[in-house]
Each structure stands twice: as C-alpha cells, then as structure tokens.
Amino acid sequence: LKDIQYVLSMYYNKLEVARFDSNVDKYVGYTEFGVKQAEYFNNNPSEIARRRAQRETYCQHNIDIW
C-alpha cells in the first residue's frame, strides 16, 4: 500500500503547468506561472492536507476495485 501514487496535474493550453505528486508530497511547477502556483499551494498547509486526504480517500478506497 505504500507504493500508491496520487497525482493531480493542472494544464493550460495542453501544457502541464503544475502537479501535486503524493510521492514528493508537494506541488511542483513546470512553467513560470506554475512555479508561482506551486509555491502558493505549498505554503498553504490546508491545501497539502487536502491532497493527502484525497490520496487516502480515493486511492486507498479503490485498491480492491482495481
């Protein structure tokens, strides 16, 4: 169960701007705008806690189904 990965990618014009990766446990930006967004989200503890909870809620719940 430790190797489950939750990834949330944000795109604009078919270009990945930023991503939350549960293995890294933070947002990573891939464009100038995405870096700013990642910094904003990473400095918000409730946003990080929300994504951790989504990993538990979505991924852990669906282990037996998939």
Image (tube, grey):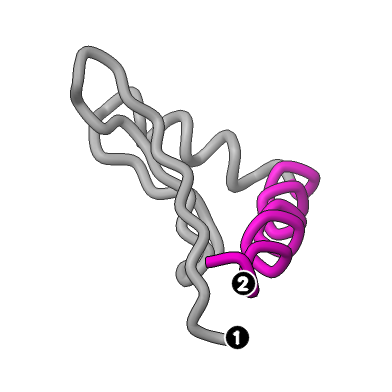
Q: Are marks 2 and 1 in contact (CB under 8 Å)?
A: yes
Instruction: Tell me: residue 55, above or below residue 36.
Output: below
| 60 drawn magenta | yes
Image quadrant where one finds the N terminus: bottom right
- In the displayed structure image, the side of residue 2 where residue 23 appears, left or right: left
- Indicate left or right for 9 with 45 as reference: left
Q: How far from the left and from the top, in percent, is residue 13?
A: 21, 13
Q: Which residue is mark 1?
A: 1
Q: Nearer the viewer, mark 2 or mark 1?
A: 2
Left or right for 61, reference 63:
right
Q: Amino acid at mark 2?
A: Ile
Residue type at mark 1 is Leu
Residue 32: x, y in percent?
Answer: 26, 28
**Residue at 48 percent of width and 68 percent of height:** 5
Which residues, given as a range, are shown in magenta? 45-66
Residue with the most extreme left position: 14
Q: Earlier in the sequence, mark 2 or mark 1?
A: 1
As helix, strand or loop, the secondary structure at mark 2 comes to loop
As rendered, which of 14 and 17 lies closer to the eye?
A: 14
* Quadrant in the rendering for residue 9: top left
Question: Where does label 2 land, which residue?
Answer: 63
Q: Residue at x 53, y 64 (%)?
A: 22
Q: Looking at the image, which residue sits at the far front?
A: 65
**Image-quadrant location for residue 46:** top right
